[in-house]
Image (cartoon, rainbow, N blue to C red):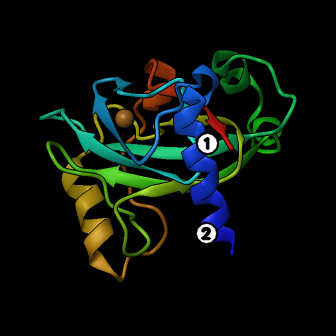
Amino acid sequence: MRKSTSLFAAGLCLVAACGGSSATEGTIEITANDYSFAGVPETVAAGSELTLTNASAAEAHELVVMKIADGEERTMEELLALPEEESNALVEFQGVLVALPEQDGVNPEGPGTSIEVTEPGRYAIVCFIPQGADPAVLEAAMTGGESEGPPDMGDGTPHAFLGMVGEFQVEG
Ligand SMILES: [Cu+2]
């Protein structure tokens, strides 16, 4: 019965023009550049899926999606500047897609090429891959299977600190 209720709600939405809400829904295609995300809507409808396309020919990028704690109003810059344990306690990991240069993002830990956002709230997207990391090392780690620990991606500045962050709101 849930299904028919939501269909009914969608019908109402059409008639009432949805009160001017402009939440983007469906599949949201985010593009990674060196070093920023493009195509990030301000508001996203709950149940939408995020995908990642890497437009860079040189760098690998990732899309880490985190839900920010309700009531948290500091900017992404302020949250990133906090000690790691403190910022970790303020966010809830939702998923990650990794994209090699000029490729689409895939879940490095299993099947899947998208991340669904279901709960309303404020979300952060971040890329933590270090600047200058060798995409071949990352690719080997993703396809290897017998990797021990995280791949050695060098000690470059994580892209997040070069501006590769974004945020959006999920509306129920
Ligand atoms: Cu990146």
Q: Which label sits on residue 3? A: 2
Instruction: Give how far across and how far down residue 155 sits, in percent.
Output: 43, 37
Left or right: residue 131 compared with residue 95: left
Which quadrant of the figure has residue 168? Answer: top right
Amino acid found under the numbered disc labelled 2? Lys
Judging by the rendered image, the residue that carries numbered circle 1 is 12
Q: Nearer the viewer, residue 42 or 18?
A: 18
Label whose residue precedes the other's in the sequence (2 or 1): 2
The answer to whether one can see residue 60 in this image is no
89 or 26, which is in the foreground?
26
- Is 52 displayed left or right of 95 in the figure? left
Residue 36, percent across and down?
Answer: 37, 23
Q: Residue 165: horizontal and vertical position, in percent?
A: 50, 26
Q: In which image quadrant can residue 101 be found?
A: top left
Q: How many marks?
A: 2
**Which amino acid, mark 1?**
Leu
Q: Nearer the viewer, residue 6 or 156?
A: 6
Which is closer to the viewer, label 2 or label 1?
1
Residue 103 makes an appearance in the image? yes
Q: Quadrant of ligand 1?
A: top left
The secondary element bearing badge 1 is classed as helix
- Give how far across and how far down residue 131 sits, in percent: 34, 31
Residue situated furthest right in the rendering? 71
In the image, is residue 33 above or below residue 96? Answer: above
- Rendered-image quadrant of the C terminus: top right
Residue shown at the point (56%, 41%) measured from the top left: 45
Determine the residue positioned at 65% across, 21% down: 76
Instruction: Give the residue displayed 47% in from the left and 34% down from the top.
Output: 24
Q: Residue at x 53, y 31 (%)?
A: 23
Secondary-structure class at tag 2: helix
Q: Quadrant of the N terminus?
A: bottom right
